[in-house]
Each structure stands twice: as structure tokens, then as C-alpha cells.
Amino acid sequence: MEPSKRELVEAVFAGDSELAARMRALDWSATLLGPVEEWPQALRTGVRIVLDSARALEQERPPQSEELRASEERLAEMSRRYRELQRTHEELQLEAGLLQQLPVSAWTLKPDGTPDFVNRVWLEFAGQTLEFVRSNPEAWMNAVHPEDRETASKAFWDGVRSGQGFSFENRSLRVLDGTYRWHLQQAVVLRDEEGKVLKFVGTTTDIDDQKRAEEALRESEHESRLIVDSIPGMVAVISTSGEVMFLSKPILDYYGKSLDEVNSQWTTGDMIHREDRPG
């Protein structure tokens, strides 16, 4: 059988001190803390600690009304901090729910770098369990390509220890087919009102297709360059503003200059005869 409101008040403000009596008589529903029956257990316990401390003071001097106000302020501060922690916890739970629905690998780290949440996209990709990933900050790096592990570890710890987050690329093993794919690892920091790091929130984005496209483009440009350079004549590409965009190898060999040198000297240097220069 649950205690009545009166019995609950008597239990929370137990004691024969005058301070306890005043707190029992106070209408708490009219204060910032609200009715006693709605207080969390942690706050009720805190009240009893305060009353025990106040009892020793009353043995030395008469109780003052300031004591009651000070006690109420301390209790209000305890309640505020408790509710802030509870609200922060609820917000983090909501964020975790949202991260679980993202189509990319998403995760959160504790301030020391240990993962406390990883969504199923990464777990299925790497074939790891949540318990394994949580076992130590670098457990997830078992999936990182051996050649990338050192640089990935350094970038990771630099971002965690500085409290600034991080952004780096590495290859990770896809357990489904045993292939390594390029990923972009990014993390931002989540802080409380006082600036203290609460968590790092991050994503692991598969950029392998983009990497392959960039490599194919570089190879295509290289092949095109070889073809143009094989032409016996001199080939140049100049923009409408007069900037030299491209010069074939025969031109560069003829002048013995780089593309940058040609851009800075072709109208003012010795590349063009003085009688043929503009102006």
C-alpha cells in the first residue's frame, strides 16, 4: 500500500529539528520544486542529507529563516541539475533513434573515444557486433586496411583528445565479399551548456565509387595528354582572357619552361621577340 501524501512528507522531512518542522509545514506545491510526491527519489534522499547536516548546526545556534531559504535553494539546484541530466539523456536517446534510421553508417562516441552507439549499417558492413565495437575505442579499426590503420588511428585520437572531432579517409573491409572500400570518417562534438564534451556524433560514408571515378578521370586525362603530346606539332589551349590553360610537351620542350612560367612570361619575357610583343 502506497503511503499517503502526509505520510510521504513526514518521511522525507523526518526529524525533531525546527528546520524539519518548518519544511514539513511548507506548501511545496507553491515552490519551484513542486509537490513532494512528484519529487524523484534522488531528491528525497538529498533532502534527508541536508536535514542531517542542519541538525548539527541547530545544536550550536538557533535556527534562522535564512537556513530554510538556503535549504530550499540547494534543493532547487539539485532538482534543476537532475532534470537537466534527465532531459539530456532523453535527447541522446532520440538522436540514437534517428541515427539508426540513416542509410549510412552512423555512431556516437563517449568523450574518451569509446563507441556507445553504432547503427546496423556499419555492423552489417563490417560483420561486427555492438558488444565488440564497444569493447575498446579502436575495436572497429579491425576492419580498416592494414596500410591505413596507423594514419586512421592518429587522426582519430587527435580529434578525440583535442575535443574538436575529425575527418579522414580510409579503406574498410566489407565482410560480405572480402573487398576493401574507401570511406570518409567524420565526427562532430556535442557539448553541454558549460562547454564540456558529452559525445562525438559521426558518420562513415562509403566514397569508393567516387574514388574510382576520380581515378578513372585521372587515367583518362593522362591518356589524353599522352595522345596530344605525341602530335608532332605544338598544341596550346588559351582561355578568352588570355590565360594559357594547356601546352603540349613539344611546346614546353621548345621553350624549356613549365606551364606556370609560360603564363607569367609569355608576353613579357624572352619567349616572344620584342618586336612581336603587344603594345
Image (cartoon, rainbow, N blue to C red):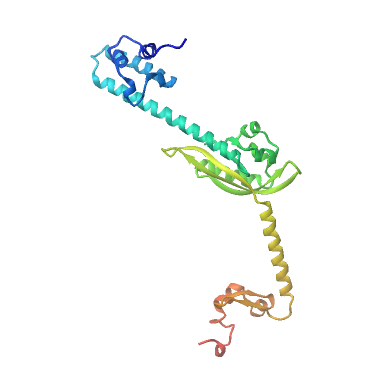
Measured as percent of width and height from the top left, residue 184 is found at 62, 49
Measured as percent of width and height from the top left, residue 27 is found at 31, 19
Measured as percent of width and height from the top left, residue 146 is found at 69, 45
Please give left or right for residue 235 compared with residue 45 in the image: right
Q: How many marks?
A: 0
Q: Which of the two residues, 254 or 7, is positioned nearer the viewer here?
A: 7
Please give left or right for residue 147 compared with residue 168 in the image: right
Question: What residue is drawn where x is 31% and y is 24%?
Answer: 30
Question: What residue is drawn where x is 43% and y is 39%?
Answer: 195
Q: Quadrant of residue 230?
A: bottom right
- Residue reaching furthest right? 177
Please give left or right for residue 217 compared with residue 20 in the image: right
Q: Which of the two residues, 262 or 45, is positioned nearer the viewer here?
A: 45
Against 103, is 21 above or below?
Answer: above
Please give left or right for residue 186 compared with residue 177 in the image: left
Q: Is residue 113 visible?
A: no
Q: Which of the two residues, 175 or 56, is positioned nearer the viewer here?
A: 175
Measured as percent of width and height from the top left, residue 159 is found at 54, 44
Question: What residue is drawn where x is 55% and y is 87%?
Answer: 277
Q: Is residue 80 visible?
A: yes
Against 203, is 29 above or below?
Answer: above
